[in-house]
Image (cartoon, rainbow, N blue to C red):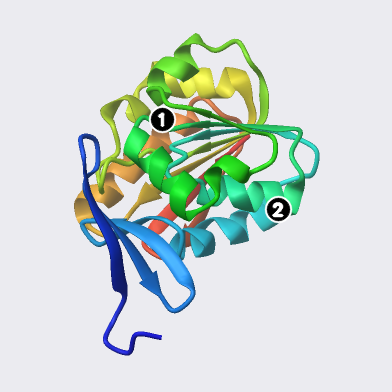
Amino acid sequence: MNMFGPKVLETIQSKFNGKLEIRRWGRDIYITTNNLTQSGGLVNDLWNPVLKKTAQKDKSWLVLGLAAGTVAKIISAKYKPEKIIGVEIDPIMIDIGCRYFGLDKIPNLKVLNVDAKDYLLKTNNQFDFILVDLYISDQCPRFVYSKRFLEKLKRVGKLVILNHLVYDDTKRRSAEKLIKLLSLIFKNIRLRRILTNVLIICE
């Protein structure tokens, strides 16, 4: 292990995410933008506890904000999904996922390099689970807070989980706004605070 901190394996400039660093710490490989982990590392710690309580085997999944595929890998390994559609706008993130994280080897995963909003609003597919983890660096796109987007999530997903950062006042206020909007659309809302995030579970 590098006792002086993580080793940077590669640095890449992305049109969507800015400066991406692929880092290794011990056996773990992860991606950061502005020192926020996008895939690998803490992303496992964020999603595992909630999926353990909510996920079921042999179901269909939609992941909006696939990044390099950390969550899709968890779903595939533990819950044996019927199918996973992973939507990721950044082709560089998909390439990193294939080269470092085995993204292209995840069973039953279909990766779509498209805008998450466009995909969701156009799709007629139905999913048992939808995971929404849409961040460009530490910014959530404005459309995530729109009634049209949230209502479409309700129509196509049986259970929807949204990830939102809450590490400062601005992000906490944005999360509160999102939770209020969701409570007008979904019958049941549960919150799970993990690390610097809140996961909003909607049914």
Residue 109 horizontal side relative to residue 141, left or right? right
| Residue shown at the point (51%, 18%) measured from the top left | 152
**x, y percent for residue 58:** 80, 38
**x, y percent for residue 147:** 39, 20
Q: Quadrant of the C terminus?
A: top right
Q: Which residue in the structure is indicated by mark 1? A: 181
**x, y percent for residue 46:** 50, 59
Q: Which residue in the structure is indicated by mark 2? A: 77
Dot 1 or dot 2: first in sequence order is: 2
Q: Is residue 48 above or below residue 102?
A: below
Q: Around disc 2, counting alpha carbons within 10 Å, would you say few (fewer than 14), some (14 to 19), or many (20 or more)?
A: few
Q: In front here: 160 or 86?
A: 86
Residue 133 horizontal side relative to residue 49, left or right? left
Mark 2: secondary structure: helix
Q: Quadrant of residue 42?
A: bottom left
Q: Around disc 1, counting alpha carbons within 10 Å, would you say few (fewer than 14), some (14 to 19), or many (20 or more)?
A: some
Q: Is residue 162 above or below residue 31?
A: above
| Residue shown at the point (27%, 46%) measured from the top left | 173
Residue type at the position of mark 1: Leu
**x, y percent for residue 62:** 58, 31
Q: In front here: 203 or 59?
A: 59
